[in-house]
Image (spheres, rainbow, N blue to C red):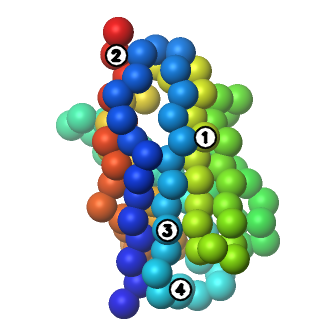
Amino acid sequence: QVKLVESGGGSVQPGGSLRLSCVQSGSVPDNYNAGWFHQAPGGQREPVARFRPDGAIDYFGSAKGRFTISRDIARNMMFLQMNSLIPADTGVYYCNRGGIHGVWGQGTQVTVSA
């Protein structure tokens, strides 16, 4: 049915940057949110950034001022530019449509350490 695939994770030093990508195959209802979640080791999945159906953007927690969400609707892609990375950003980042009960990708690992 619907599939989301993330890429772009890796290992960086504190203060570094990464750009995550998500590609969607298939379709979901037009009123689904589109966004990114983060799950720290042993932690819960927490929202990082999202598009509302009307295109407005929300940032959550420490992502504010450091991360930028964007998308290319024609190519069914979404991105997360991550700057000024800190060790607490370490974990798996998931692409999502429709919130916690919606569609999830497999995740891409990000490790921030000196």
Q: Which residue is mark 1?
A: 81
* Residue 41, percent from left and from top: 24, 35
Q: Which residue is mark 3?
A: 23
- Is residue 30 at all visible to an observer of this figure? yes
User: On the picture, is 2 further left or further right than 68?
Assistant: left
Q: Alpha-carbon distance for marks 4 and 3?
A: 13 Å
Residue 101 falls in which quadrant of the image?
bottom left
* Residue 48, percent from left and from top: 54, 45
Task: Name the kind of residue labelled 3 in the image.
Answer: Val
**Circle 1 — which element?**
strand
Who's the residue at 39% across and 41% down the image? 9
User: On the picture, is 39 further left or further right than 32?
Assistant: left
Viewer-proximal residue among 8 and 26? 8
Q: Alpha-carbon distance for marks 3 and 1?
A: 15 Å
Q: Earlier in the sequence, mark 2 or mark 4?
A: 4
- Is residue 45 at all visible to an observer of this figure? no
Q: Earlier in the sequence, mark 1 or mark 4?
A: 4
Q: Which residue is mark 4?
A: 28
Viewer-proximal residue among 88 and 3? 3
Q: Alpha-carbon distance for marks 2 and 4?
A: 37 Å
Who's the residue at 46% across and 81% down the image? 25
